[in-house]
Amino acid sequence: MMNLWVAGMADLWLELGHYEEAVYWYEKSWGHYWVKPDWVAQFAYALYRCNRMERMRAIIDEAIREKREQFTESGVEECSEAWTEQDKRDHLDELSSDIAAFEKMTSRIEEGYIPPLIFNPNLSTRCYLFGCRQHDPEFEDKE
C-alpha cells in the first residue's frame, strides 16, 4: 500500500502552482488512492494546466468506469446486520453523486473551474501547535 504522503505531495505542488510536479505525484498516486471527485478534480486540473487533455479525459473516464462498477456490485450485494438496506441506499446515492460529478468534470475545468484544496489532517492528537508534548518532548507544564 502506498503511503498517504505521496498523494499529499501532489496536493502541495498543485497548491504552489507547480503543475508538472503535481502531475508527477498524482500519477504515482493513481491506482493507489481513493477515487473521489475532489481528488480527481485536482489531478484533472493539473493535467489541464499542463495541456495534457487526453490524459485528463482518460482519468475522468476511468473514474466513471470504476464508480459504475462499484454501483453495480453494491446494487446486488446482500444486506445483513452490518450492511443494512439504508447503508446500501446511502452508498448507492454517494456513488451516483460521484458519477454525476465526474461526468461534469471535464466541461467544468475547461470553463475555468479551479478545484479547491481540501485539507484534512490525519488526527493523531488534539493539538497541532508547537510547544505541546507531542511536538516538543522537552516541553514542561509550568503550573
Image: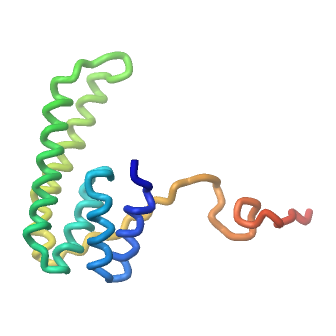
Q: Position of residue 33 (x, y in %)?
A: 32, 52
Above or below, 56 relative to 103? below
Q: Residue at x 18, y 80 (%)?
A: 50
Q: Position of residue 28 (x, y in %)?
A: 31, 62
Above or below, 80 relative to 118? above
Above or below, 63 relative to 132? above
Instruction: Tell me: 32 left or right of 60.
Output: right
Q: Quadrant of residue 119?
A: bottom left
Q: Residue at x 23, y 18 (%)?
A: 78
Q: Quadrant of residue 60?
A: bottom left
Instruction: Tell me: 27 left or right of 135.
Output: left
Q: Position of residue 42 (x, y in %)?
A: 27, 67
Q: Residue at x 32, y 77 (%)?
A: 21
Q: Position of residue 75 (x, y in %)?
A: 16, 28
Q: Nearer the viewer, residue 40 or 55?
A: 55
Q: Quadrant of the C terminus?
A: bottom right
In the picture as drawn, the residue positioned furthest to the bottom comes out as 17
In the picture as drawn, the residue positioned furthest to the right comes out as 143
Q: Nearer the viewer, residue 140 or 10?
A: 10
Q: Residue at x 13, y 79 (%)?
A: 51
Number of numbered discs present?
A: 0
